[in-house]
Image (cartoon, rainbow, N blue to C red):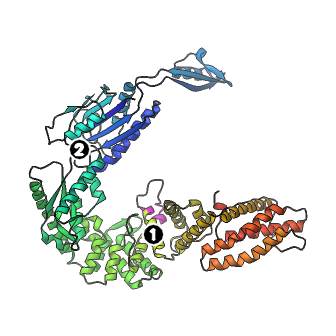
Amino acid sequence: MPQLLLELFSEEIPARMQAQAGRDLERMARERLAEQGFLPEAMTAFAGPRRLTLVVEGLPEAQADRVEERKGPRVGAPEKAMEGFLRSTGLTQDQLVEQDGVWFARIERKGRPTPEIIAEMVEAIVRGFPWPKSMTWGRGTLRWVRPLKRIVCLFDGAVVPFSIDGIQSGDVTEGHRFMGEAQPFRVKDFDSYQAGLAAHFVVLDVEERKARIMDGARTLCFARNLELVEDEGLLAEVAGLAEWPTPVLGDMDPAFLDLPPEVIRTSMRTHQKYFAVRDPAREGLAPHFVTVANVDAPDGGKVIAAGNAKVLSARLSDARFFWDEDRKVRLEDRLEKLKGVTFHAKLGSMFERVERIATLAERLAPLVAADPQVAAQAARLAKADLVTGMVGEFPELQGLMGGYYARAEGLDPAVADAVRDHYRPQGPADAVPATPAGKAVALADKLDTLIGFFSIDEKPTGSKDPYALRRAALGVIRIVLEGGVRLPLREIAGDDLVAFFADRLKVLLREQGKRHDLVDAVFALGDDDLVRIVARVEALDGFLTTDDGANLLAGYKRATNILKAEEKKGPLPVGAAVAMSDAPAAETALVGALQTVEPRVAETLAREDFVAAMQALAALRGPVDAFFEEVLVNSEVAAERDNRLRLLTQVRDAMGRVADFSQVTG
């Protein structure tokens, strides 16, 4: 079937916008084609420094004829209502069909040629494209991220004719801005388009550009017995800056290697988009860098490397200045400046926040086996680097620089490490703090953020989370679970935050393959100890995968349904069931089983052996099954009925000590 090829060629598209632009182009095209009844066989979008490209396979040559049925007013409705409906459909009343007292219109629409639909679709996409930032140019009204220069639009090898703000669609595109002949060339389909771009020094696919960068950079480093310091974020960015990415290995002044390696890497990454390089034979960075050029230089990149080295030296000289000046002032002496830094209008200054964190860190320290005084000191100094020159220049180094400055002052290494690590973990790939004091300060920092913003009703809503509270909660959860920290969450944070943590824990456990209903079943017990909750969830998950667990769950639900029905009639009988002299054997067996199981469950729960508690409950499976098979609960004899209801209540309560099984689905 015919193919659609669309290219929107413009001036440079910011690298940070390209990936989303590719997704938006594909989404918008798919939605508009679906509205017209088209279901393509395949659709792929590409995004690069100067072009967005879409190739759609398997479109028909024309739209199928369609019949649209529209519901109108009721028979006998006011005349004006009927007139409005007829006007909207273009029909007369004798063309309507009456069905169940309502008028219906059947409108036959003949399918249109696909190129006609494509032309309308492309204009709608271009005019409504959701760029984060856009601009107009010349005298036109079209908004685009940068001036739009060309539109290639081909269907089945032929140009789809249309014009948008004076830009006429065609079959001509351009290759690399500088390399080769740099002349426009014609294309007829996606294969000729992709091959033509490659011949004109343009790599269309971003994944291919990334591979070209990594392969070239690793090869350059290998030839000099070096290793590339890989950086996925930087790779994604530089792959969006060059159409013909060519790695170049450059040299930097070795004198700068006495700066913290994070400072060197951040300066390279933030200002210059360079990759750092290490020598595998020694610790730290090597005096080299890899930059990504957009040309194949005739001299192998020597001039490019030399020019970039000069710029890097200037940047690192600035970093050295901040490093030297910052170390002249102690962290303790910087705290006064935090009084002038607003954390939030309703939550006070950063100085006030530091005081709260220090108090909380000292309180939490025993829970993570940390020295309370060390934790409090680290917490007081943790935010001091916010008013240093280095962090002012490189905000992403906050905390890290505080750790370096604390060491330079000769402070306790435990304090320095805690200051360095107190923001961790900052994401799923980041490790939790390694030291006890670091855990105490990190927990205090995140909990203060959560408690503070919840107290002023600044909670996450939908996809909006401007204060990264979900990330803070996940950070607390990871520190607690990975360190086995017994945190009294409700006592510290309150009920609202316990519920919020429950939601975050569900997300985390779901990612690990656990069922969210099991989290609900455990949280329903009112427990706020995350370590204990997860242990219960894991034990419950394992128990319900067994035949005993699945059957006992069914028995539990049957018992609770009976009890709910009886509760509507009046209060349930209280007390423990007894083995009545004339009771059926199954009833007597269940009474005996409960007398054995209940103390066993209590004992295993007391020592938090939840697997053993589940195993104890499994002993009820057979007696419960037999009870429901052989015993009539609603006996006409009141004493028998009451005893059996007490028995079901005991079954429900025994299981309810482990989890709220009513929350378990299935």
Image quarter of the N terminus: top left
- Range shown magenta: 452-470
117 or 476, which lies in front? 117
| Residue 456 is a magenta residue | yes
Residue at 35% x, 79% y is 378
Q: Is the residue 366 above or below the residue 13 in the image?
A: below
User: In the image, is residue 523 above or below residue 306?
Assistant: below
User: Residue 344 lies in what quarter of the image?
Assistant: bottom left
Q: Is residue 546 magenta?
A: no
Horizontal side of 417 relative to 366 (left or right) equals left
Indicate the position of residue 430 as horizontal and vertical percent values.
Answer: 37, 67
- Going by the image, does 595 lie left or right of 424? right
From the image, tell me which residue sits under label 2. Answer: 12
Q: Is residue 368 above or below residue 37?
A: below
Q: Tell which of 435 and 361 is nearer to you.
A: 435
Query: From where the camera sits, is residue 393 visible?
Result: no
Identify which residue is drawn at 33% across, 76% down: 419
Image quarter where the C terminus lies is bottom right
Q: Main secondary structure of the magenta part?
A: loop
**Marked residue nearer the N-terminal end (2 or 1):** 2
How far apart are the two marked residues, 2 and 1, measured between alpha carbons? 41 Å
Q: Residue at x 22, y 78 (%)?
A: 329
Nearer to the camera, 459 or 562: 562
- Looking at the rendered structure, the kind of residue marked 2 is Glu
x and y percent of residue 157 in the render?
Answer: 31, 27
Residue at image mark 1: 478
Q: Position of residue 126 (x, y in %)?
A: 33, 35
